[in-house]
C-alpha cells in the first residue's frame, strides 16, 4: 500500500558528488521522519542521516559536513546530497520512511530496495 523507490546511485571518483533521491507513493496520509541508511559489504546497516517532517536533521559523524539531507513534502521525496565522497562511503544506500496510511490509523515503517554507490580511489 506504500512504496519507496530510491535512485541516483552510481560509480564516482573520490572527491566527487552524487545526489540520491527517494520517492514514496501509495496510500499516504502523512510522512513523519525520512532517512537514509547504508550497508557496506560485510557490515551492518548504519544510519547516515534523518530528517523530520519539521525539517530537523540528524547526521552520522562520518558524514557531517559532507552530506546534506533534505525533503520535498509536496512530492513525498527525500534527497541526500553527497559531496567530497570517499572510498569508505561505498555501500548500498537505503531509504526509510515512517508513514501514516491514508484512511487508517496504521503507522508503517517502509524501506526501499536500495541504490548502490561506489566510490573509486
Image (cartoon, rainbow, N blue to C red):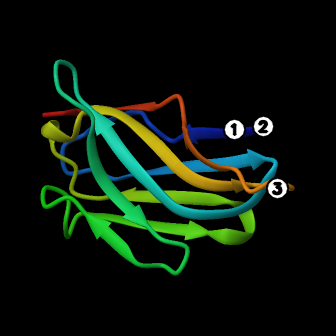
Density class for disc 3 (Cα within 10 Å; few <14, some 14-19, many ≥20) is some
**16 vs 37, nearest the viewer:** 37
Q: Are marks 1 and 2 in contact (CB under 8 Å)?
A: no
Of discs 1 and 2, which sits in the foreground? Answer: 2
The residue lying at 33 percent from left, 59 percent from top is: 49
Q: Position of residue 96 (x, y in %)?
A: 49, 46
Residue identified by numbered label 2:
1
Image quarter where the N terminus lies is: top right
Q: Is residue 89 left or right of residue 33?
A: left
Q: Is residue 62 visible?
A: yes
Sequence order check, earlier mark of 3 and 1: 1
Pointer 1: what residue?
Answer: 3
Mark 3 highlights which residue?
A: 102
Q: Secondary structure at mark 2?
A: loop
Dividing the picture into quadrants, the one containing residue 82 is bottom left
Dot 2 crowding, Cα within 10 Å, few <14, some 14–19, many 20+: few
The kind of secondary structure element at disc 3 is: loop
| Alpha-carbon span between mark 3 and mark 2 | 9 Å
Amino acid at each position: 500500500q506504500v512504496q519507496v523507490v530510491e535512485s541516483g546511485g552510481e560509480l564516482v571518483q573520490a572527491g566527487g558528488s552524487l545526489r540520491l533521491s527517494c520517492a514514496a507513493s501509495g496510500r499516504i496520509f502523512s510522512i513523519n521522519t525520512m532517512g537514509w541508511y547504508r550497508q557496506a559489504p560485510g557490515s551492518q546497516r548504519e544510519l547516515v542521516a534523518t530528517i523530520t517532517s519539521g525539517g530537523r536533521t540528524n547526521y552520522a559523524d562520518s558524514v557531517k559536513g559532507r552530506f546534506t539531507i533534505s525533503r520535498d513534502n509536496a512530492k513525498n521525496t527525500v534527497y541526500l546530497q553527497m559531496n567530497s565522497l570517499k572510498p569508505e562511503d561505498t555501500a548500498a544506500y537505503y531509504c526509510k520512511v515512517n508513514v501514516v496510511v491514508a484512511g487508517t490509523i496504521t503507522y508503517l515503517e517502509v524501506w526501499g530496495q536500495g541504490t548502490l554507490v561506489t566510490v573509486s580511489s
